Structure formats: structure tokens, C-alpha cells
Amino acid sequence: MRRVSKFLTQVYATDAFFDAVGLGFFSAFGAHKVYQHIHNIELAILLGIVTAVGGGLIRDILLGRVPVVLTKEIYASAALLGAAVQLFGEVHIINPRVSPWLAIALCTLIRMLSLKYKWNLPAIKTNT
């Protein structure tokens, strides 16, 4: 039984890592592609987030799970920071050659740290 539990833990950790890396890549590249065609920073950040979160949303729906973006985990917030760092490179605030890698690394790091240390967003308080 312990072997199965250890195996499932390793599978979940591997899945979480690649999910975090994918989140970083899609947030950076989604923001880059939008800004390349439409020079609007707000729209590029928004669509970078939608691009990054959309893949995980579809995956969770196909697996029959509650989508991560609908829980209080830090997911879309990490994508927001990744897209913003990418756009800092697009407008030459930081080096454009470094910005995609920095955006991917930052988004992945924030997501992985939030999973490791169980960081969550605050819940909405209800008066019931």
C-alpha cells in the first residue's frame, strides 16, 4: 500500500511541476503573441492569462475535477505576473531577450512555491 501511495505522490508532484511550467510558457507566449499583433498592454496581459489558464481548465474538465482556477489556489495570479514580466520586455523596461525566460521562471516558481507552502488566496466571507 505504501508503494502505491508513494507512486501516486510522485505522479502528482510531476503533474504539478509540468502544469506550473506550462502555465509559465503559455502566459508568456500568449502575452507576447497578442502584443505583437495588437499593441495594447491590458489586452495582452488579459489574453496571456486566459491562454495560460485555459489549458489547465480544459484538462481538469476532461479529468472530471474541479478546475484549479476556480479554487483558492494561486494559479491565475502567477499567470498574471508571468504575462506582466513578458510585457516589461516587450516595452523594453527589461531586456527583451531575457523577459520570456524570466516570465516563465517567475510564473513557475510562484506556482510551485504556492503548492509547496500551501499559499492560497483569501476566501470570500459570507454572512450566512
Image: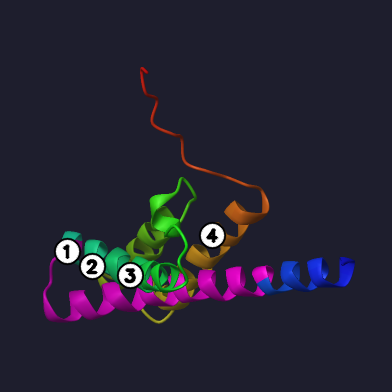
Residue designated by label 2: 47
Give whichever of discs 2 and 4 has the lower sequence position: 2
User: Is the C-beta separation of discs 1 and 3 under 8 Å?
Assistant: no
Q: CA distance from mark 1 to mark 4?
A: 23 Å
Q: Tell me which corner region of the image, top left, top right, bottom left or bottom right, holds residue 64.
A: bottom left
Residue for point 35% across, 58% down: 80
Pair 2/3: label in front: 3
Point out the image quarter for the C terminus: top left
Q: Which residues are magenta?
A: 12-41
Query: Colour scheme of this structure image?
Result: rainbow
- How would you rate the neighbour count of disc 1 (Cα within 10 Å): few for under 14, some for 14-19, many for 20 or more? some
The extreme right residue here reads 2
Q: CA distance from mark 1 to mark 2?
A: 6 Å
Q: CA distance from mark 3 to mark 4?
A: 16 Å
Give whichever of discs 2 and 3 has the lower sequence position: 2
Residue designated by label 4: 111
Give whichever of discs 3 and 4 has the lower sequence position: 3
Q: Is residue 40 left or right of residue 128?
A: left
Instruction: Report whether residue 93 is seen.
Output: no
Local SS, label 1: helix
Residue designated by label 1: 43
Query: Residue 61 location, x and y as percent?
Result: 39, 68
Local SS, label 3: helix
Q: Tell me which corner region of the image, top left, top right, bottom left or bottom right, holds residue 69.
A: bottom left
User: Is the C-beta separation of discs 1 and 2 under 8 Å?
Assistant: yes
Residue designated by label 3: 54
Q: CA distance from mark 2 to mark 4?
A: 19 Å
Q: Amino acid at mark 1?
A: Leu
Q: Amino acid at mark 3?
A: Gly
Query: Residue 76 location, x and y as percent?
Result: 39, 57
